[in-house]
Amino acid sequence: MMKGIQDYYPDHFGQCYGCGRLNEHGYQLKTAWDGEETLTRFTPSAYHTAIPGSVYGGLLASLIDCHGTGSAALALAKEKGIQLEGFNAPRCVTGSLQVSYKKPTPIDSTLEIRGIIKEVKGKKVVVEIRLLSKGEVCVTGEVIAIQVPDDFGK
Ligand SMILES: CCCCCCCC/C=C\CCCCCCCC(=O)SCCNC(=O)CCNC(=O)[C@H](O)C(C)(C)COP(=O)(O)OP(=O)(O)OC[C@H]1O[C@@H](n2cnc3c(N)ncnc32)[C@H](O)[C@@H]1OP(=O)(O)O
């Protein structure tokens, strides 16, 4: 599996259900740069069903959520010139999450979640997200992520 910004969060940020590397029950999303965009992949299982053939919308929202905060952390690291090593990644939590379901999301394919950084202003980052299945955009969203201090959650 590719390495993501989540691999550079310290242990107390590694417990997140969506993206914590230490949560054995979670999705363990990995968010990385893909050119100017950010990218996460997730392969749904049959039990992630809404109606047969389509992915449950709440799951799709949580993929957008954690990919958004991870993308924001990548953007802050880039802006501040931080070389990722050890557990030194900037960390963000979700301020707001907006999701728009454009069409049913086929479940029998690996999903691609792509982020575009729209704004970095102080500790606030706005990320626009597209979620694709079989090459088609099924869901769009916007995450406003806010950087928190290093001791947040300790
Ligand atoms: C308390 C529990 C938190 C749990 C966090 C879990 C940690 C996870 C750890 C590790 C995983 C890695 C991370 C993955 C995360 C996964 C996603 C989640 O599930 S996160 C959980 C859901 N989110 C919350 O529970 C946030 C609760 N809210 C807060 O803690 C604060 O309200 C916070 C940090 C979001 C903002 O508080 P301020 O005091 O730092 O912000 P100000 O200084 O007032 O504003 C700065 C800028 O941000 C905007 N802003 C602030 N809050 C906003 C909001 N809610 N929506 C939109 N914009 C907001 C403001 O308008 C301002 O923007 P202008 O500079 O004026 O342009």
Image (tube, rainbow, N blue to C red):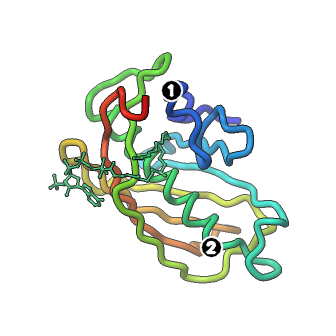
**Disc 1 or 2, which lies upstream in sequence?**
1
Q: Report the side of 109 relative to 114 (left or right).
A: right
Q: What is the quadrant of residue 105 in the picture?
A: bottom right
Q: Do callouts 1 and 2 mark residues in contact (Cβ within 8 Å)?
A: no
Pick the quarter of the image with the C terminus.
Answer: top left
Please tell me whether mark 2 sits on a helix, a strand or a loop: helix
Name the outermost residue toward the top.
86
Q: State the CA–CA distance, disc 1 to disc 2.
A: 29 Å
Residue beneath the point at 80% across and 78% down: 53
Of residues 10 and 133, which is closer to you in this image? Answer: 10
Which residue type carries mark 1?
A: Tyr
The residue carrying pointer 1 sits among few (fewer than 14), some (14 to 19) or many (20 or more) residues within 10 Å by Cα, namely some
Q: Report the side of 115 relative to 44 (left or right).
A: left
Which numbered marker is on residue 57?
2
11, above or below 118, in the image: above
Rendering coords of residue 29 (x, y %): 62, 45
Name the outermost residue toward the front.
154
Of residues 130 and 17, which is closer to you in this image? Answer: 17
Which residue type carries mark 2?
A: Gly
Which numbered marker is on residue 23?
none
54, above or below 24, in the image: below
110, above or below 78, in the image: below
The residue carrying pointer 2 sits among few (fewer than 14), some (14 to 19) or many (20 or more) residues within 10 Å by Cα, namely some
Q: What is the quadrant of residue 1 in the picture?
A: top right
Rendering coords of residue 66 (x, y %): 51, 51
Q: Report the side of 133 relative to 75 (left or right).
A: right
Residue beneath the point at 39% across and 65% down: 142
Name the outermost residue toward the left.
122
Residue beneath the point at 81% across and 67% down: 108
Determine which residue is flagged by label 1. Answer: 8
